[in-house]
Every structure is written in structure tokens, then in C-alpha cells.
Image: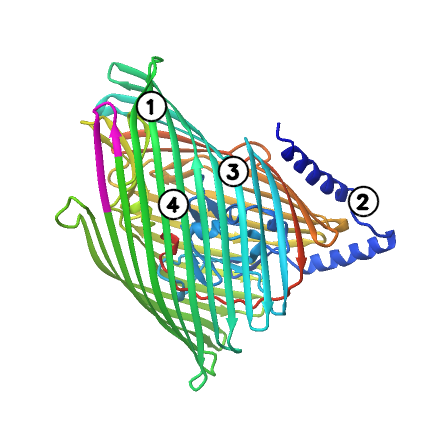
Amino acid sequence: MNLYLPFKIFVILFFFLLSLFGYAQNETPKDSISNTLKEVVVAQNKKTFTNTNGNIKVDVANSVYNSIPNTVDLLSKLPTVQVSSDKESISVIGRGNPLIYIENQKVGMNDLNALAVADIKTIEIIQNPSSKYEAEGRSVILITRKFSKKDGFRTEIYEMASFKKKYNNYMGFNTSFKKNKIEWKANFSYNKLQPWENHSIDYQIPDAEIASKYDVTAYSKKRQFIFSGSLFYKINEDDYFSFSINSKLQKDIFPINTLTYNKNKEVVNNVLTYSDNENKKNFINSFLNYSKKIKAIDTQVFTGFQYSNFDQGMWSEVANNYNNTQLELAQLRDQKFIVNVFSGKLDIEKKFKNEMKFEIGGLYSSAASKSDSDIFDYGNNENEITHYDFKEQNLAGYSQLSGKIKKVDFSVGFRVENTNVDGKFKTDLSPLINKNYTNFFPKAQFSFAIDSTKIISVNYAKSISRPNYSSLSQGTTYINPYFLYARNINLDPTIVNEISSTFQYHDKSVKLTYYQNTDPVYNSFFYDKDLKIMTFKDVNFDKESAFVLDFEVPFTYKFWTITNSLVFVSEKIEDASAVFLSSKPYVYYYSNNEFKLQKGYTLVAGFRGVTKQNKGVFERNARAMLDLAVSKTFFKNWNCSLNFNNVFKKINEEEVFTINNINSKAIYLVDDREISISIRYSFGKVKGTEFTGKKMEENSDRVN
């Protein structure tokens, strides 16, 4: 038996429990009281959550959230933010998929996985981003990192033990150093994860007299190497140069077991499908930025370049056992996907003496992907090999004017984008996908100050949401002999029109929004009568519209700070292929309760949930979750946290819909019940923030 793991867990628990009972502080009672009082005073002056005009800002560095092992899990605990069960996408209640920025640089899910939580200072959820946040900006998640103003260094080492269905381990370090005009940061982490997932779909095809149900379970052994580095050189007070690079190298080994019941007219089959799978996902992203102030005309000029690469390979060997006979090989599948994205950007900003600011800029980006599929069918003794190439070029320009006239703050701007897309299989003589279109995206926001405590704002925006590049490839996943998951090379972007108004009183706000989407993307079924195979993939629906009423109600009572979000949503999804079920309002609720206790302890109880959702086409069940966490810093440089996520039980996500005359009920089980213990040790000293980045890449969030 390996004694290292039990010993490591024992040491972590020992130190944490020791500090919990007050014996970890080697000091006299008088000193203890003095230090405790100082800690309480500082904590009371720093709020974890602040609300400004409906925008929520989270102080990660000085809260219990800095003990969460990865950035995606951290975001899932924030107000109105929802992370998909596969942790591959993020949405904001009532606002769809947000833009994600790290230091004003637009990034994607892979960048989030490469960012250490210990490196984060604050996270802000911006509800009404301006034109400079690109055309996809219905909402923005802005992440600010910790950097130094004064010379010095700081290094942090962390270890986290996580207990779900199986044991998971996170370990790593991050360091920063500043000397004169040069500053650099680096972090590295190695994660050994064993995630579990399960889902089932029960569906009927009345036209073909088919009734089928499958239940699939997968245990993964996942290894992740994550590293990033940043270099910042301050030329003078106004000019700077910066370079950053981050990467995640991941390998999965995951056997999948699927139990299937299938009735086709009078023929009934019970099938056990077993597949060995190996999957690699390697990602790298780099930025090169230069900012220069032209003092003669008081204008700031920025130029930047970015290169991203995502390389994924999926190998599977599949076997089926029909009606308790024996396993027989069915398919050998080898699929590869790679995408390269390059972009260059220019921004010009001019400020005037009357508080006006004029911004103008442009961006060019080019993406090229290849998806190769090699599938050998043992039953037919046939090998099917296909190669699909995809190219996309974007040329964008924007202009924006903002400022203040008397008591009215305003921001008006527009963005123009031209997109050119080509997609073809190597066997095609001409492109299968050939699109060239130009879109115009206006945005405007006006804020009226009634007095020093009350503000009313009105916002209009037109935006776009594009599918990521892997969604536009030819990949498929084998579930059982009757069912495939597939990507869709024919997906179109979604166009969004939105108008909203917000009333702010002190730190509380209420916001009413109406939006309408054209070509929204949702899942759909397609049945091939000849092959007798069901395919499940994303398609563009006809339209979607919604009213959203959002209340943000924080308050503080002595040592207790509460952040409450209450969102009422009336959503309607429509498509000619789907049966319209019903559209009824549902409620999303979030309550974060933070208690500052004696001796420097912080206790957090987070409750979030959503009532039953009737969205027109889709009906989804009600869900709720309670998370608990306690954190303590001792010996000045040691921080220990105990987290208990999803206290009651694992979440079951249920979805019912009828599309293309196919009735379906799906259940997804998420391995979210977790007890975790983390310990961090930091040394060195840095203060403040200096590092500056810049937005530049419109497509890095699509590189997956």
C-alpha cells in the first residue's frame, strides 16, 4: 500500500485542526488578542462582493475563494454564473455565453484552465459591455491578476486533496519577481484527477416504431500539466511592452460502459457497449503587446499580436455484447483535430479636456483547422477515412465615444465585421461551406444620476455569438450501435438584439432586460432510417426571446455579509422541427453568506439553485446546491481551507423535449459532491498592481 497519500492527508488535517482550536499560534494571550482584533478590522473593511450598476465584483485574493483548486470551479460559485456539466462552457443567467478577459486580453476556456487561482486578484461580471469588448459581448467576465509595484518577489506553493467518488490531487506553485522596470510571473501545476460522469437518454421514435434507452458511465484518469509565464517591461510612465504565454497539456484514459435497451418493432436487444479511450488535449496561447503614448497629441496607441494552437486526438476501440453473449469488436476509431489562430490588433484612444474619450481600432484574425477521421468497422471490414479543412478570416473595425454631459454619462459606438468562411473535404472539388458576410453592431448606454445614491441607466446592444472551432469540425462519439454524438460543420452564428434598464440604489440594483436571438444553437436529434442510427448534434433553431428581471441585494450585519441574486426569467425557444411544450417564468437564486469569526476564521455558506424551467422547446428540472467552506491563515504565511461542496447530494440535471418527431428524456449526473482540504505556503513580499495587458483576440475563446 502506498503510505504517502494517507500521511499527506494526516499532516494537512493535523495542521488545520490544530489551528482550528487555537494552538497553531505561538504567542502570548495578549499578543493573540491584539492580532485577532487587527485581523477583524481589516476584514470588515474589505467586502468579498461589491455591486455597481448591476455589475458584480469579487475580491478573490482576500477571500476563501482563493483556496478553490481551479479557475473554472471558482467561476461556478459566483452569482449568475453557470458552468456546464462537462466544464467546457460558461454561461451567465439571462445573458448567454460571456466574453472572458484576463487583464483586458480576451481568452477562452483553455486559458482559464491554465490560470492559477492564486494568481487572481479580482473577478468582475460586467452586464453591459461597450463596443470595445467586441461584438460577442453581451456580458464580460473580467479577471484581474496580482502584480507588483515595488521591487521584490513572492512565491506560493499549494497542495489540495479533493475527495469525490475518487481521490483527486492538485499541486503547484506560482512566483513573481520585480526589479526596476522589469517584472515577470510564472506558475506551474500538476493535477491528477479521476472524474466520474453518468448520463442516460430515454427516447422514442413513433414513426419508426422504435423505443430505446441507454445509460452510460465513465471514470477518467486525467493528468494535467499547466504552466504560464508573463513578462512586463515598463519603458516609461506611459509606455510598456509585455509578453505572456500559457499552456495546458492534458491526457485522459477513460473506459466507458454503456447499457442499452433497444426495441425496433418486435425486435428487442439488450446491449453492453465497452470502449477503451485515450484522449489528448494540448493548448498553447501567446500574446505580444506594445503600448505607446504620443504626447504631442495626447493619444494612446496600442498594437498587439496573438497566436493560439489547440491540438486534440481521440482514439477508441469499441466492443458490443448483444443479449449476454460475448463482447465482439465493433469499431476502431482514430480522430484528430488541430486549429491555429493568428491575430493582430490596433487600438487608438484620445481623451479630451471636457471628459470626452474617443476610441477607434481594428482587428484582423485568421483561423485554420484540420479534422481527420479514420474509422474501421469490424462488422463490414471497411475503413472510412475523411479529411476536413476549415478556414475563417475576420476583419473588424470599431469606433466609440464616451463621456459625461452634466449628470448624464454616455457611451455610444458601433462595430463592423466582415467574415469569410471556407470548409471542404479533401475529396470535394469545390468548398462545401462558403460564406462571406458583413455585420453592423451598434451599442449605446446612458446613465442618469438622480442624486448621490440613485442612478438609472438604459442600454441597447446588438451582438453575435459564434460556435467554437471544434464544433465546426467533423468529429463523432460512439455511444452504442444505435446512437452517435456529432459535431456540425453547418452551424451559423447567433445574432442577438437586446435592450435593458437598470436602477441602482446605494449598492443594490434591479435590472429589466428583453432580448431576441436569431439562429440560437441547441441540441437536436436526427434519425437515419437506412443506417438505423440516431445522431445527436447542435443545430440552429429559428428564434429565442426572453424577459429577465434581475435583483442584486447585498447587505452587511456586523460580522455577517450577504450577497443575494434573484433573477426571474421568462424564456421562449421556438423551432419548426420541435414540439412547443410550454413557456413559463422560472427563478434563479443565489445567496453567499460570509461570516468573519474570531481568531481570523472565515466561514462561507453558499446556496444557489433554479426552479423548474419551461423554455418552450425544453423542460428542465429544479436544482439546488449548498456549499460550505472555512478558511484560516496561521503562522502568517500558511493558509488552510476546508471545503464541502454540494452538501446534500449530487445534482441530477433532467431535460425533456420533442424534436423531429422524437421524444426524449435525458438525465445527467454530476460528480459535484466533494470534500477538499487545501494548504498554501507563501513567502516573499509584493504590493499593489502594475501589470497591464490589452484586448486583442476575438477568437481565442473559440479555440477548443
Measured in 3D between alpha carbons, the distance from the residue under mark 3 to the one under mark 1, in whole angstroms, is: 26 Å
Q: Which SS class for mark 2?
A: loop
Q: Which residue is mark 2?
A: 23
Disc 3 and disc 2 in contact, CB within 8 angstroms: no
Dot 1 or dot 4: first in sequence order is 1
Q: For mark 1, give the secondary structure.
A: strand
Q: Amino acid at mark 3?
A: Leu
Task: Give the residue pinned by disc 3.
Answer: 193
State which tag comes first along the sequence, 3 or 1: 3
Residue count near mark 3 (Cα–Cα under 10 Å), binned few <14, some 14–19, many ≥20: some
- Between the C-alphas of marks 1 and 2, the distance is 58 Å
Number of the front mark, 3 or 2 = 3
Going from N to C along the chain, the mark reached first, 3 or 2, is: 2
Where is residue 523 drawn, in percent x and y?
32, 39
Judged by its main secondary structure, the magenta piece is strand
* Mark 4–mark 3 distance (CA, rounded to whole Å): 37 Å
- Check residue 319 in the rendering and tell me which mark sits there, or answer none: 1
Q: Is residue 530 left or right of residue 514?
A: left
Is 385 within the magenta? yes
Q: Which residue is mark 4?
A: 571
The residue at the point 34 percent across, 32 percent down is 316
**Residue lying at 33% horizontally and 21% vertically, measured from the top left:** 320
> Could you say which disc has been placed on residue 497 in the image?
none
Residue nearest the observer in this picture, 334 or 566 = 334
On the image, the x and y values in percent for residue 180 come to 59, 73
Observer-nearest of 651 and 673: 673
Is 155 drawn above or below residue 320 in the view shown?
Answer: below
Numbered range of the magenta stretch? 375-388
The image position of residue 529, as x and y in percent, is 19, 27
Extreme residue in the left direction: 429
Q: For mark 1, does the 10 Å Cα neighbourhood hold few (<14), some (14 to 19), or many (20 or more) residues?
A: many
Looking at the figure, which quarter contains the N terminus? top right
